[in-house]
Image (tube, grey):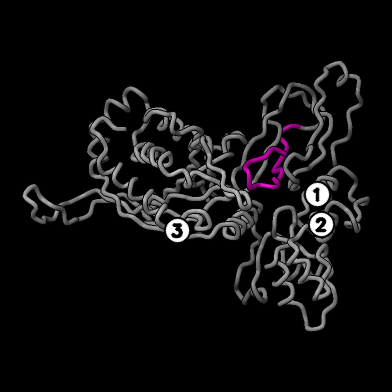
Amino acid sequence: MPQMGESIAEGTVSRWLKKVGDSVKRDEPIFEISTDKVDAEIPSPSAGVLMEILVGDGLTVAVNTVVARLETDAAAAAAAPTPEPAASPSADASASVSAAVPRAAVVAAVAAAVPATAIPAASPGSLEDRLRSKSSPLVRKIAAEHGVEISALSGSGIAGRVTRKDLEAFLAARPAGGAAASVAGASMYAPAGVEQHGPLPTPWAGDVVEPMNKIRRLTSDHMSLARKVAAHVTTFFEIDLTRVARIRTAMRKDFEAQSGQKLTYLPFILQAVTMQLKRHPVLNAAVAGTDVIYRKQINLGIAVALEPNGLIVPVVKRADELSLTGLTRTVNDLAARARSKKLNPTEVQDATFTITNPGTFGSITGTPIIPVGTTAILCLGAIEKRPKVITGPDGEDTIAIRTCAYFSLSFDHKVVDGADADRFMSDLKKALESMPETGF
């Protein structure tokens, strides 16, 4: 299972494109995966014969789990007996597995490799048990005081880690005088991947109840984690893009004829952002405990909305080294392949700063959540013409029609001071409002 982003601990095998015994070519897609960041076809690392599938369709496993075995020696593959394809677990077996090992990715991998009837519940001291028990000292202390067995709870953290909120939600929902939690009881009150505060809501007559799909559950996990690890603050600036609009109009015809790419406002903004990230490195950083990692590379994550729903954040690597044409081509290519599910795993990794653009849907502005592993995210509002009061050549005030947009910056106040964030935004505003006629 490939790593599809620093914050992603697991992925789901959506479906196998090859079956046991099939020959595959190097880089030929062999299975599809689904995470909260991307749905993607995974290519074969080498040519050979698919000898064994260890993780079946619909199962979730930890990153770096072996999901299949490929025989790369043609002679050995021809001589080896063809194994029977792994049988899909029955509905009853799947239900019992999910009850016994909710969201335990490593245990799910083992479950796919052996007959369903041979899958035992997680035993004390098992890998799943140890993963869940790796909670903070505070969580373990609270659990001990209330007689709760942590390994029996369904944690919402990565790899099933039980958080303080998980424990508090269980304690709030547990009947007075209740004994240590059972796995089934814990799953009821704290379903994996979903944080609850207080009693669960119940459906009313006429309501439609639909379980979250895998992408939505993983997105829920990731967003909850992002809110936990960063102290979110957002600052807002209105930026006059009239000058950028004029330069874009002047360049557009020749640019599109020569490059074959549609010229939007985004590449101009990306260029200005990369310039300011060099001047304000704390916005291009990551927090590791009590250390701050100042990234030298500037890798811009660009949020791409999918149809009918969902979101992917492909990454423009070393964006500061690309020209306006290079940025345009790269962004357009990544967006097109994101929507067609053709991104490679490496293309959604290692973002150092993220830009989201809800303005394309008409949104004036927003307060986006900071992706895990970064310190800030920039939100671009709708670009529209507005009446503005400006100073004329003789110092008089006058009303003019200007092309403007609201930009917002969400930043991690643990390491980014408000003054630092506002200086970054102020410099970005100046850069865009005074852009040279030839561009940056």
Q: Return the residue at label 2.
A: 101
Compared with 365, 46 (above or below) is above
Question: How many residues crowd mark 2 within 10 Å: few (<14), some (14–19), many (20+)?
Answer: many
Q: Secondary structure beneath disc 1?
A: helix
* Dot 1 and dot 2 residues touching (CB under 8 Å): yes
Q: Position of residue 440 (x, y in %)?
A: 31, 32
Which residue is labeled 3 in the image? 367
**Residue 282 versus residue 368: which sits nearer the camera?**
282
Q: Position of residue 112 (x, y in %)?
A: 83, 45
Q: Residue furthest front?
A: 290
Residue depicted at 25% across the width and 41% down the height: 434
Q: Quadrant of residue 121?
A: bottom right
Magenta region, residue range: 1-18
Q: Residue 358 or 223: which is nearer the viewer?
A: 223
Residue at numbered disc 1:
108
Which label sits in the foreground, 3 or 1? 3
Mark sitting earlier along the chain (2/3): 2
